[in-house]
Image (cartoon, coloured by chain):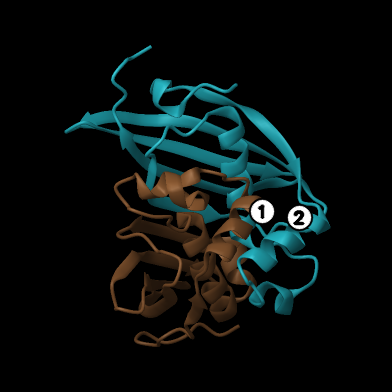
Chain colours: A cyan, B brown
Amino acid sequence: MPPRLDTLAKGHEFPATHFELSAEWVEEYAAAVEDEAIGLLGPELVPPMAVAALAVRALLERAALPPGAVHIGQEMTFRRAARVGERLSASARVVSRGERQGWLLMGIDLSVDGEGGPRMEGRATLTMPVAEERP
Amino acid sequence: MTSPAVGTELAPVVVALTQEKINRYALAGGDGNPLHTDPQFAAQTQFGGTIAHGMLLLAYLSRMLTAAFGEAWLRGGRLKVRFRAPARPGDTVSAVGRVVRAESGRTVCAVECRNQAGETLVSGEAEVTA
């Protein structure tokens, strides 16, 4: 069972997670978001938000979201187009953590690398109720 | 692909959001937070019902930007947004954008997702480097 996100301190680094952009998964993702635009560019290209989604999925395998957690902001930069079949690695780090009026605000940096260099990087900002009991 | 001029409205992406689509994204994205997929759980939260994943709304923005800028969006796009209000099943979500600056090979767009009432769900900026 992964630790809850709200128990992690600023500076916590998540172990890198490796994943593959399989054709089946890319097709499933593109269908879920109804992305017809990417197919017009080339059948081997992957929607950039799919890479971001996999990075978030990797993060969620390393830390459980507490009930009531809400995504309030997102920054991302795409460095290079990802292609079907690529193997990527995602890493993440808690870069900010603060409390205000019973809510915890956390910033998490995400980065995804592949062969030949980075694919994307970004920062997710989440808020969640402050837990009554602390670790 | 030629960069659009300042003031150009990007071709919008309009999606009729359903719980089925949210569930499908939850499976593909591996984000099974019950706030998105469990109506009974979500009814007890501050939102009073299920809401779409923020990343699903960003996928609609990205689809619009891919159509407008092609591969330049995939290899040099930047997006910075705030989530302003939840998107709910039954909403019609429109991802819209307008070019606000174009200089030195950089094109900056104001982007938003809105619901059928015109309420802003997501707002921010997207930047593409040619």
Tags 1 and 2 touching, CB below 8 Å: yes
Say left or right for B46 vs A37.
left
Which residue is at 56% across, 36% downward?
A60
Instruction: Count all numbered tags in the image, as a single digit.
Output: 2
Which residue is at 34% across, 65% downward?
B121
Farthest residue in the left direction?
A: A101
B18 and A89: which one is in front?
Answer: B18
Q: Is residue B39 above or below residue A92?
A: below
Which residue is at 79% across, 50% downward?
A86
Q: Quadrant of residue A80?
A: bottom right
- Say the numbered circle drawn on residue B28: 1
Q: Mark 2 Cα within 10 Å, few/some/many (few <14, many 20+)?
A: some
* Residue at mark 2: chain: A
Which residue is at 36% across, 74% downward?
B115
* Residue at mark 1: chain: B
Q: Which residue is mark 2?
A: A25
Secondary structure category for the residue under label 1: helix
Q: Quadrant of residue A132?
A: top left
A7 and B97: which one is in front?
Answer: A7
Query: For the N terminus of chain A, which image quadrant?
Result: top right
| Amino acid found under the numbered disc labelled 1 | Ala
B33 and B11: which one is in front?
Answer: B33
Farthest residue in the top direction?
A: A135
Secondary structure category for the residue under label 2: helix
Q: Is residue B108 above or below residue A7?
A: below
Q: Mark 1 Cα within 10 Å, few/some/many (few <14, many 20+)?
A: many
Q: Calculate the distance from the C-alpha at mark 1 to the C-alpha at mark 2.
A: 7 Å
- Residue B8's x, y, as percent? 40, 88
Q: Is residue B122 above or below residue B12?
A: above
- Residue A13's x, y, as percent? 52, 24
Query: For the C terminus of chain A, which image quadrant?
Result: top left
Q: Quadrant of residue A9?
A: top left
